[in-house]
Image (cartoon, helix red, strand yellow):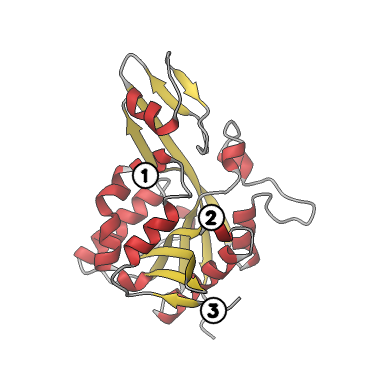
Amino acid sequence: MQYKVLKNIPEQEKIQNEVTSELWPEFMFHDPVSNANWHKLFESFPEFQISLMSNYEVIGIANCIPYYWNKSFEKLPDRGWDWVFGKGINDKLNKIRANTLNGLQIAVSKKHQGKGISSLVLKEMISLARDNGFKYVTTPVRPILKSEYPLTSIDSYIKWRREDGLPFDPWLRVHVRLGGKIIKPCHKSMYITGTVNEWEEWTNMKFFETGRYVIRGALKPVKINIEKNSGEYTEPNVWVLHEVNHT
């Protein structure tokens, strides 16, 4: 497929929001860390936000943030997305020179899914890291089929394998095929909370009693507490590491 990579363009945030607005369940747009910092990606790190365009259509996007890490990647925090987002911004503010690129998001336009574009976007992300001198790419991966198995722990899910030995999950499989190494789960990658009414609006469901609920698009059940008028969702992701080849 012929495509071109767009970066450092003024309308990048708007272009990408048009793609992602169709993809994620509503509650995913209410992570406080993302809401407070998303615009900073395009203000402070515009060179690390890319869109792939083919035939005048955006077919896929990637959002990245550089950060500094000097420990074993096995020691990456359990907080995942929320942690690395804040870490990259704080490193930039404190003038700490980054040595690792983190992929926050890869998304493929709904119209163009199933065509292998996610692999193209991931390759461009790794190339972006190489062009900027980074040796490693990390990403808290959101396994694409985990929402179909919300009662299975993320620890068990990432061990599922096909007969060929590759991960059961298609998105983890894309990473592994491109040399990615599954490091470990990050059980508290993203934390989303709201009132019972807000969760009812986000999910188009009704909650009459306290309990754990399976929500469409969620990777694990959401905890609803009627007495406290609150709902909590802690999203598990999977830390994946790519070593960038500079030869």
Rendering coords of residue 151 (x, y %): 59, 30
Horizontal and vertical percent for residue 199? 38, 29
- Residue 199 vertical placement versus 126 (above, below): above
The residue carrying mark 1 is 29
Q: SS for tag 3?
A: loop
Residue 111 or residue 247, whichever sits in front: 111
**Which sits earlier in the primary sequence, circle 2 or circle 3?**
2
Tell me the crowding category of disc 3: few under 14, some 14 to 19, or many 20 or more residues within 10 angstroms, Cα based. few
Relative vertical location of residue 46 with respect to residue 186 in this rendering, above or below:
below
Closer to us: mark 1 or mark 2? 2
- How far apart in space, not on screen, are marks 1 and 3 (Cα)? 34 Å
Q: Amino acid type of disc 3?
A: Asn
Pointers 1 and 3 in contact (C-beta within 8 Å): no
* CA separation in Å, label 1 and label 2: 17 Å
Q: In the image, what residue occupies the spot 25% across and 67% down?
A: 44
Let me know if residue 4 appears in the view.
yes
| Dot placed on the residue nearer the N-terminal end, 1 or 3 | 1
Label 1 sits on a secondary structure element that is helix
Q: Which mark is residue 245?
A: 3
What residue would you read off at disc 2? 110
Residue plotted at (40% across, 38% down): 27
Q: How many C-alpha atoms fall within 10 Å of the one at disc 1: few (<14), some, or many (≥20)? A: some
In the depicted structure, whether residue 226 falls above or below residue 242: above
Q: Quadrant of residue 210?
A: top left
Q: Is residue 157 left or right of residue 61?
A: right
Q: What residue type is labelled 1?
A: Phe
